[in-house]
């Protein structure tokens, strides 16, 4: 009988205890730690103040007449200045000008960009001055007949 009782004791000792798994580490867990940051910066575009700087005539001329770059969409020949996007061809660029996204961006760009002086006035170091409106129109497109 001692063999049977020993067998019963050994079986209870080797049974898994129900509950939470004891596995602590996982090699893939590093990817999961900062997934929110990954999603927030996945499709990061230029900010409005950066686009206002690009809209200056000198900068705009450089961006609209770029050299051919095969690493960029559309070889860097079809660029929307206001949305900071490249397009495959002239047709898609013109279609983009009619979209809701482009029109919303134009509306956002009509307000003057936020400056340090405005931040100081908001903190109580001066009197409030309403932001000025900037006149923004859709860029002109040069049609090439190749």
Image (tube, rainbow, N blue to C red):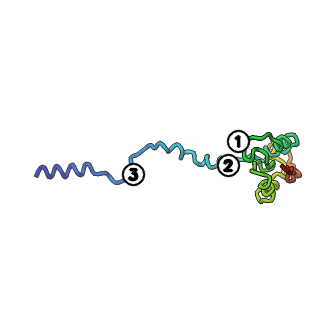
Number of numbered discs overlaid on the protein picture: 3
Extreme-left residue of the structure:
1
Q: Work out whether mark 2 precedes mark 1 in sequence or the reverse, and give the earlier one.
A: 2
> In the image, what residue occupies the spot 10% across and 52% down?
1
> In the image, what residue occupies the spot 38% across and 46% down?
22
- Where residue 63 sits, quadrant-wise, is top right
User: Percent x, y for residue 46?
Assistant: 74, 46
User: Percent x, y for residue 115?
Assistant: 81, 43
The CA span between labels 1 and 3 is 50 Å
**Given this view, does label 3 or label 2 mark the residue nearer the observer?**
2
The CA span between labels 2 and 1 is 18 Å
**Given this view, does label 2 or label 1 mark the residue nearer the observer?**
1
Crowd class of label 2 (few under 14; some 14 to 19; many from 20; radius 10 Å): few
| Towards the viewer: 43 or 16 | 43
* Location of mark 2 (residue): 43
Q: Do the residues labelled 1 and 3 touch (CB within 8 Å)?
A: no
Crowd class of label 1 (few under 14; some 14 to 19; many from 20; radius 10 Å): few
**Given this view, does label 1 or label 3 mark the residue nearer the observer?**
1
Q: Can residue 131 be seen in this view?
A: no
- Where residue 104 sits, quadrant-wise, is bottom right
Q: Work out whether mark 1 precedes mark 3 in sequence or the reverse, and give the earlier one.
A: 3
Dot 2: what SS?
A: loop
User: Percent x, y for residue 123?
Assistant: 78, 45
* Location of mark 3 (residue): 20
* Location of mark 1 (residue): 71
Dot 3: what SS?
A: loop
Q: Is residue 83 visible?
A: yes
Residue 95 numbered mark, or none = none
| Towards the viewer: 130 or 64 | 64
The CA span between labels 3 and 2 is 38 Å
Q: Are marks 3 and 2 in contact (CB under 8 Å)?
A: no
């Amino acid at each position: 009988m001692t063999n049977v009782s020993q067998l019963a004791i050994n079986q209870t000792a080797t049974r898994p205890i129900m509950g939470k798994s004891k596995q602590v580490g996982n090699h893939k867990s590093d990817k999961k730690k900062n997934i929110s940051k990954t999603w927030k910066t996945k499709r990061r575009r230029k900010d409005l103040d950066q686009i206002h700087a690009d809209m200056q005539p000198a900068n705009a001329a450089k961006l609209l007449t770029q050299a051919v770059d095969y690493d960029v969409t559309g070889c860097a020949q079809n660029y929307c200045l206001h949305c900071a996007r490249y397009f495959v061809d002239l047709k898609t660029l013109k279609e983009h000008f009619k979209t809701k996204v482009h029109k919303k961006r134009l509306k956002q760009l009509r307000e003057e960009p936020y400056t340090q002086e405005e931040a100081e006035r908001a903190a109580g170091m001066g009197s409030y001055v309403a932001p000025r409106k900037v006149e923004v129109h859709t860029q002109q497109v040069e049609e090439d007949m190749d």
